[in-house]
Image (tube, rainbow, N blue to C red):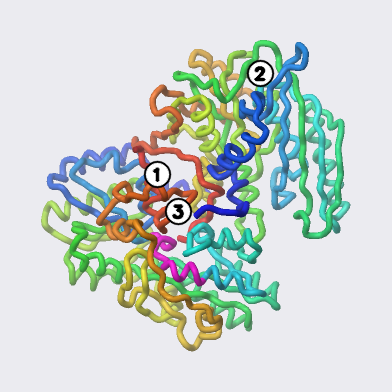
Amino acid sequence: MAIKHLEEYRDPQISRKLVEHLKVVSQNPIRLMEVCGTHTTSIFRSGIRGLLPPTIALLSGPGCPVCVTAQNEIDTFITLSRIDDVIVTTFGDLMRVPGTNSSLQQERAYGSDIRVVYSTFDALEIAKKNPLKKIIFLGVGFETTAPTIAASIRTAVEMKLDNYFVFCAHKLLPPALAFLMEAKTTNIDGFILPGHVSVIIGLKAYLPFFEQYQVPCVVAGFEPVDILQAIFMLAEQIENNNPDIANGYQRAVTYDGNIKAQKVMDDVFEAIDASWRGIGKISKSGLKIRKEFASFDAEEMFDVRISETEDPKGCACGEILTGQKIPTDCLLYKMACTPETPVGPCMVSSEGTCATYYRYHAT
Amino acid sequence: MKTDTILLDHGGGGKMAHNLIAEMMIPKFDNPILSQLNDGAIFNIEEQRLAFSTDTYVVDPIFFPGGCIGDLAVNGTVNDLAMCGALPLYLSSGLIIEEGFPVSDLEKILEMMSTAAEKAGVKIVTGDTKVVPKGAVDKIFINTSGIGIISGKVNISSHRACPGDKIILSGCIGDHGMAVLTQREGISFDTSISSDTAPLHHMVNNMLAACPDIHVLRDPTRGGVATALNEIALQSNVGIRVYEETIPLKDDVVGVCELLGFDPIYVANEGKLLAFVPPEYADIVLTVMCKDNLGEDAAIIGEVIPDIPGRVIMQTRIGGTRIIDMLTGDQLPRIC
């Protein structure tokens, strides 16, 4: 599994050169948002913020799937895990996320059968091996994970599994970008668009957004050179007053994206309004399993929907996710809210903005 | 969210494990030997200085590339003693076996324990075996304790890191943790990563011959290099700076870590050590380590600094700086 080809994207000399160029190009203060949690982590892990000229501020956006999963959805996951004969399968990040009174990690300690899997196909395998149990996969994530989860429902049809269910809490990224631009308080001068999501949806998926708002956008990969290059491209567009939508991750992202993945997603899911934790409802920003596949839809097959819950008092996650505040502005940060005792979702996931600040931020 | 139950994170080697020990164990058993908080206890019986250590092994799967729970249990305790600068001599072995466990597997495990003990030059001199009903343990758990003797001049403790000390890492990190993880049920990666489980005391012996005044030795097991460095920074009340590009890593480990969103500096090792040595001895100790086949990839990865006491920072490859903190518990594979 050697990935030597990535070395050039981590090259210190190329990085240094890009920083030098940036210092020349960037004259006026600008605010750029990296939408994706993996970008946030990579920026902190490589120490990019400390290298940028003072004119450039990076804001971390709502692109950590765990962070934006609504609290009532987390509560529903917990309720599902308490049902007899249910095995809940999930990606690891969700385990520590606090619901109103508990977390999946605590429920597992109390005796619920909750298993961390690495792909939906592991969940299908568990369903096959345990025909008397009901296996619920917690479908959380963006366009990156949605296709494989859609494909797992297709496979379950082929395998004639009647004990496999998906709770679909997926979110879609482009509607969130539009929401951020509509919320005038954020003042974002340019977007570093996510890499993985763009591999699936392609550059074309952002065109309607770009045409409406004319804000500079660059799709970026995850290595330091990728990110610095995207920042450089954005700074140049802004300085030249020439907003554009550009692909800075050409080795992975195409104009059309992964058509096959888009099709399976479209076959199995339909867009619905969805609640984002800390932010609220965003029109057509979530996915629901289509009626044809209702027998695999945990929301339809288990009667557990919990009513709306309030976000914890004092928690600034909503403002942090929309770039209006940074973690150190929140009164709970490092006080009541730490990775051991997270109050808000941004402190929980390894890619959450607050957890990333806590772990990597030098002050 | 406080918890009234023990969670897996309490055993993960991160902050929650650290707090459990500090808040619940130490106050109950408080004594000056325990509060040294080294890999083993160090004390005198008459004129002889001894190191005494214990560890329990619950690894899943019990057989993995590069070893099994048996040789891991021997090497782990041998290494805990070696990290006190001791020559390991005698081990105990306590087995808890689940009803229904295949005798052939037990035989294999005992055989590998025996070979590991012979290779390490230690004797397993006492033991205990319990069988419990199905489900009461997962297949087999092993506890080993060990004692070793420490020669007169040696004074190794995690409290002794001094500003100026160079930090040497004995080789590539993350092999054991990723070897076990990739074998675990549900993950089907095809890699060539195998555990690094090995006894380190022969190499330590040669290092001490080159520099009797090694300040700190630590094997970065659970929680990895990052956790070990944080513990030393706290216990010695010093700052630590490491350089990302100097940390030895295998491509396979980097690849699997990237796929899962893991940071290799938090991944477990079972045959690696960190040595804090006075700067004037760094090169000679490094040379000695590189001559040993367990230390051939050894490298100086950083130094102790007087500022930021209790904290660890890393200079990244591209010249930035980041904090290296202790994790809450085990790393969890990310969603995307």
Q: Position of residue A222 (x, y in %)?
A: 38, 52
Query: Is residue A78 within the magenta segment?
Result: no
Q: Position of residue B271 (x, y in %)?
A: 65, 34
Mark 3 and mark 2: Cα distance apart in space: 46 Å
Q: Nearer the viewer, residue A101 or A18?
A: A101
Image quarter hosting the C terminus of chain B: bottom left
Q: Position of residue B264 (x, y in %)?
A: 52, 43
Instruction: Using residue A258 as the reference point, say whether residue B205 is left or right of it.
Output: right
Which kind of residue does numbered mark 2 sit on? Asn
At x 77%, y 54%, the residue is B137
Name the residue that disc number 2 marks.
B206
The residue at the far left in this view is A241
At x 53%, y 39%, the residue is B249
The residue at the far bottom in this view is A292
Q: Are marks 1 and 3 in contact (CB under 8 Å)?
A: no
Which kind of residue does numbered mark 1 sit on? Arg
From this view, report whether residue B236 is shown above or below residue A164. Answer: above
Name the residue that disc number 1 marks.
A45
Mark 1 surroundings: few (<14), some (14-19) or many (≥20) residues within 10 A: many
Which kind of residue does numbered mark 3 sit on? Pro
Residue A342: mark: 3
At x 28%, y 60%, the residue is A322
Instruction: Using residue B108 as the reference point, say whether residue A316 is left or right of it.
Output: left
Residues shaded magenta: A64-76
Mark in front: 3 vs 2:
3
Quadrant in which residue A14 is drawn:
top left
What chain letter is assigned to the residue under label 3? Answer: A
